[in-house]
Every structure is written in structure tokens, then in C-alpha cells.
Amino acid sequence: MTHILVTGAAGGIGAAICRRLAQRGITVVLHYRSDRAAALATRDTLEGDGHTLVQADLSEPAAIERLWLEASARQPIAALVNNAGIFPSHPPLTTEPAQWTSAWQRTLAVNLTAPAHLSYHAARDMVGRGGGRIVNISSRGAFRGEPELPAYAASKAALNALSQSLAKALASKGVYVFVVAPGWVSTDKVAAQVHDAAVLADQPLGRVATPDEVAEVVTYCALDAPASMTAAILDVNGASYLRT
């Protein structure tokens, strides 16, 4: 039986990823930070049995190794999906110094340092078992910038670079690393914004992506993508931002 760890699995994109993986017969380890009830609700929607929960605040370095050890204690983890992320607003001209510093420290801790450390533990375990996969959730903001969320954009750009560095370091050992970079996604966290006229004007599809669409691409990377795709960054933004 194949086990996959998904961080930030309580709702939104994370929950959709868990559902899609479970539909493929995967046993999911669902990470959550504080909302255990939401994580349990997500688990209860999954097909199959044996899905488990693990709790950790990814801004705390000591919690990350504990998370990996707990997630992998009863079963080897075949793939890691680093989905958890935060995006506090902190526009540079209107944010006070203490808030600016806090936004950068926590955003980089959750969005970059935690995936780096989890990938470190995953890679070492996976190499010892003959291989595995890591899928990191980035953002179109890594490429176009986010004026009100500069730490978020910077963390995702760094996550792209981390992913490609890991892909080079681990390819020969059978560990493959992929990045999925969504734009706007219609989750509960941004429900009030995804129907805004300014947002929709930027969407050639006339709508933003759904969590299920992102989950489908993540599942492909975690289970089906060929080895030669390692280091690929896959855009899921409905042509709202094009890069060369």
C-alpha cells in the first residue's frame, strides 16, 4: 500500500489533493496545523481506509522533524506534497516595521524552510528505499511578483530554486522533484476575491482554477509523471500569466 504525506491538508487545495490521491488508491497522511476538526472532516471524505492525521506548526523548526518521524513511523512515505503555505498581507509602504519583520519571518519559515527540511528528511528516507517523489506547491507570484505580498512571492521563487536544486541532487538516486504553480484558486480563503471584476478581467478562461484542477496536476506529478520531468515547474493559472 502506497502512503503519501500532504501538508496543509485540512481544506482547500490540500483537501482536494488528498481526495484525488485517495481515489487512486493511495493511503494519505494528512498534516494540519491547528484545525483538527477540519482535518478530520477532510479525512472522512476520503475513499479507502488507513488515512491518518499528523499535527505540526511548520513555523517551529523542532516540529518539522517530529512531523516527518510521526508520519513515517508506521509506513514508508512514497511521496511528499509540500502544500502548506501562508500569505499575510504586508505592502511595503503601509506596513509597520514590526509587522513587516513578522510577515517575512513567518512566511519564509512556513513556505520555504519547512518544505526544505521536510524534503531533506524525505530524500534521505527515499534514497534508502530506492526512490520516491517530492511535489512542491509554488505560485505564479514567484514569477510576476506580488506587491502586497512580497514575502510570499519571494518564498515561492526560492521554493522553485530549492526544488530544481534538489532535482539535480537526487535524480540519480531515483528521487524526483516537481513543482506545481497555481494562480488564483477558488478556495474558501479567497472566496470573496475570486469573483472580483479585476481578478476575472485577468482570467482568459473567465474564471479562476478550481482546487480539483490543481489536485489533478499534483496527483500526476506524485504518481504518473515520467522521470525525465524531474525539476519541471507546471503552471496552473489558466493563461493568466505566461512566462518564457
Image (cartoon, rainbow, N blue to C red):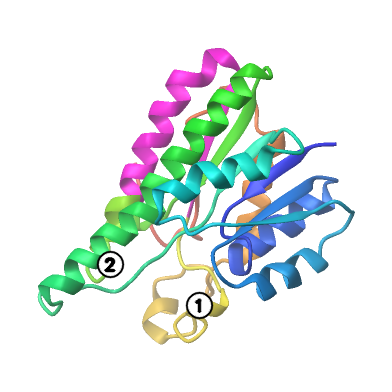
Viewer can see residue 128: yes
Front-most of 182 and 177?
Answer: 177
Q: Position of residue 226 (x, y in %)?
A: 65, 27
**Magenta residue span:** 156-181
Residue at 41%, 86% in the rendered image: 197
Screen quadrant of the N terminus: top right
SS for dot 1:
helix
Residue at 37%, 35% in the rendered image: 162
Residue at 57%, 22% in the rendered image: 228
129 over 216 or under it: above or below: above
172 over 2 or under it: above or below: above
Residue at 70%, 38% in the rendered image: 73
How would you rate the neighbour count of disc 1 (Cα within 10 Å): few for under 14, some for 14-19, many for 20 or more? few
| Amino acid bearing label 1 | Lys
In this rendering, position of residue 115 left or right of residue 104:
right
Q: Position of residue 43 (x, y in %)?
A: 77, 64
Q: What residue is shown with label 1?
A: 189
SS for dot 2:
loop
